[in-house]
Amino acid sequence: AQSVSQHNHHVILSEAASLELGCNYSYGGTVNLFWYVQYPGQHLQLLLKYFSGDPLVKGIKGFEAEFIKSKFSFNLRKPSVQWSDTAEYFCAVISDTGRRALTFGSGTRLQVQP
Amino acid sequence: DTAVSQTPKYLVTQMGNDKSIKCEQNLGHDTMYWYKQDSKKFLKIMFSYNNKELIINETVPNRFSPKSPDKAHLNLHINSLELGDSAVYFCASSQPTGRQETQYFGPGTRLLVL
């Protein structure tokens, strides 16, 4: 069964700091990878996704993520965070075979201090 | 013109009651899902329907019964509510397109069982 690990549970940064959130998955086959963001009290919004091709994908709001197949990783990055980036970030994976449901990581709470 | 909508947004009820949550999507997608987010923010698939047919049924108590009257709607009925059912329930939809599909989430229904 596939699983997703997010090692950073709670990250506190000052505005303008750089961000990198880790995501590792366990699945030997081909996967689709996603990062979702959940702002306080709101629903999940898609930040970015990787299906195939260029392993460096760019998403909304200046976020990007890099798929490293050899490391089973899909880390999220942003060069300069803003206070409005305060939210919960979820990495998710779906395999190309089998059931079509997202497996989520446990989430990383990002707190950006002004 | 919300893509995936859920009602109600908040639901507070007593143990033992029966309640329903409704979900509608206007994206023309064939597949719909219910996810549960627990108090630790962990998200897990509960059910998935494809064109009104149940395709994923996780290890969920049979007090939970999904119903899909048509492919744009997926409702969740919960009998004999228990304290542990308190959570945020998210509906999502996607359009299967081979390997590449993205799930879009509704705003969530926050259920509190007293």
Image (cartoon, coloured by chain):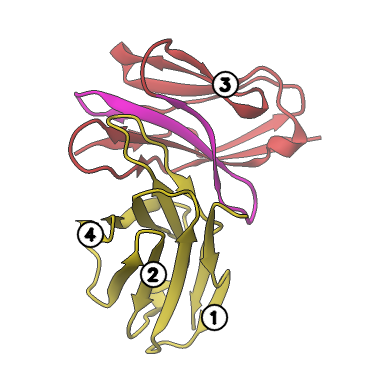
Quadrant location, the C terminus of chain A: top right
- Nearer to us in this view, A105 or B21: B21
Is B97 in the magenta? no
Question: In this figure, which residue is indicated by the disc labeled 3?
Answer: A77
The label nearer to you, 1 versus 2, is 2
Badge 1 vs badge 4, beta-carbon distance below 8 Å: no
Question: In this figure, which residue is indicated by the disc labeled 2?
Answer: B75
To which chain does the residue with label 3 belong?
Answer: A
Pointers 3 and 2 within a single chain: no
Colour displayed for chain A in the image of the structure:
red
Chain that is yellow in the image: B
- Nearer to us in this view, A62 or B15: A62
CA gap, disc 1 to disc 4? 30 Å
Indicate the secondary structure of the residue bearing disc 4. strand
Pick whichever of labels 1 and 4 is earlier in the sequence.
1
Q: Residues within 10 Å of mark 4 (few under 14, many from 20)?
A: some
Does residue B40 lie above or below A79 as drawn?
below
Look at 29% across and 73% down and name the residue there. Answer: B64
Pointers 2 and 4 within a single chain: yes
Does residue B5 lie above or below A113 as drawn?
below
The label nearer to you, 2 versus 4, is 4
Which residues are the magenta region? Answer: A25-50
